[in-house]
Amino acid sequence: MSVRILHVLDHSAPLHSGYAFRTLSILQQQRQLGWQTEHLTSPKQGPGEALKEQVDGWTFHRTPNRDGIGLVGQMKLTARRLDQLITELKPDLIHAHSPVLNALPSLWVARRHHLPVVYEMRASWEDAAVDHGTTTEGSLRYRVSRGLESLALHWADQVTTICEGLRGDIRARGVADGKITVIPNAVDVGTFKFGAPADESLRAKLGLDGALVLGFAGSFYGYEGLHLLIDAVQRLLPAHPNLRVLMVGGGPQDAALKAQAAAAGLADKVIFTGRVPHAEVQRYYELIDVLAYPRLPIRLTELVTPLKPLEAMAQGRMFVASDVGGHRELIRDGETGFLFKAGDAGALAGSIAAVLARRDDWPRIRAQARRFVEVERTWASSVARYRDVYGRALSRKGRSLPALT
């Protein structure tokens, strides 16, 4: 007998995001543990009327979306679809993932069906809204959002989160420490080639022959601070005239970053690839000498740990990162990567220059970083923590988690 878990998600593959990649990693490991997983996405997956979609061998149940529907309407649609699926699939447990727009419908419907709910808070809804520009910290909407988030955390049978920064924020809301479990971000090290040589044909295609390459791969959100990287390049060019920046991805800041590079006379120094298929990203990583993660110091980045530095460590890539809390929790300065003062383009340039001056140390640092993720940050070890979480949640309903076979 196996446990059946119904995951309630904001969005999923085939959309590309750190959220979607974490979800797939969790699902893969849970299946390896012998658990049955079902998956429902909210209206935020995008427009469409399909109730089900197959993606790379995974079945995702969808919530049909309607144009112009508000947040309350989205939650009602999610609740209605969840109610249908519980009747159809008969799960043992609901695992709702951020945002709280998924947690509240899960709690409403699960109560009616007498099912336990685990709520996984990957970031606080109110802080994400600040970053998206839909509210400001301390506004009425911010306070209401925070109140709803806190309500969901208190109502859930168990709470998980992705890092110690968020655990502290949840604890500060009055949630008992014994109810909170950190399931940290991790990597599947087997999917990353360590120290793989660069694809010379791709290097030539991008005009990077003979260049010293800085880079970033991911979504171009404001909080990533990528404008600082372009500023830093101007400071570094006199000493490194062959310097180029490879920007892999896209997002809200795409046009602004291109305009900034052009205005600074760096249009030929900063190469924008656009979004590339996830399976191809490593080929671009391998062209980059030093990766940069210049996240800005805001509540979101201070509390939340990202995936990108872990992926860089798994590949043995050299990188610099701002000293926001989310980075400090992951990175051992000078051992697995390098930290610099957040929000300071001069500090970023200085950190890159210092890394370039320490090439003799690169093999040792790369090996230490890879060893860190192999020992401390594998998905197998992270996902194994759900066993106790699910067991405690089920026990609140007088049930137990079946033994692994």
Image: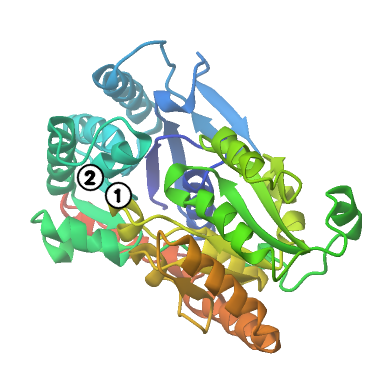
Three-letter residue code for mark 1: Met
Given residues 191 and 300, the one toward you in this image is 300
Which secondary structure, mark 2?
Answer: loop
Residue linked to disc 2: 116
Q: Position of residue 15 (x, y in %)?
A: 56, 35
* Residue that extends furthest to the top in the rendered view of this protein: 67
Calculate the distance from the C-alpha at mark 1 to the C-alpha at mark 2: 16 Å
Q: Is residue 291 above or below residue 269?
A: below
Given residues 229 and 181, the one toward you in this image is 229
Q: Position of residue 305 (x, y in %)?
A: 40, 60
Q: Is residue 357 above or below residue 29?
A: below
Given residues 348 and 302, the one toward you in this image is 348
Circle 2 Cα neighbour tier, 10 Å, few/some/many (<14 / 14–19 / ≥20): many
Three-letter residue code for mark 2: Pro
Q: Position of residue 45 (x, y in %)?
A: 47, 27
Name which residue lies at 12% across and 31% down.
Answer: 140
Q: Earlier in the sequence, mark 1 or mark 2?
A: 2
Q: Position of residue 136 (x, y in %)?
A: 23, 36
Q: Which label was assigned to residue 121?
A: 1
Name which residue lies at 60% across and 66% down.
Answer: 312
Q: Is residue 187 visible?
A: no
Quarter of the image where one finds residue 367: bottom right
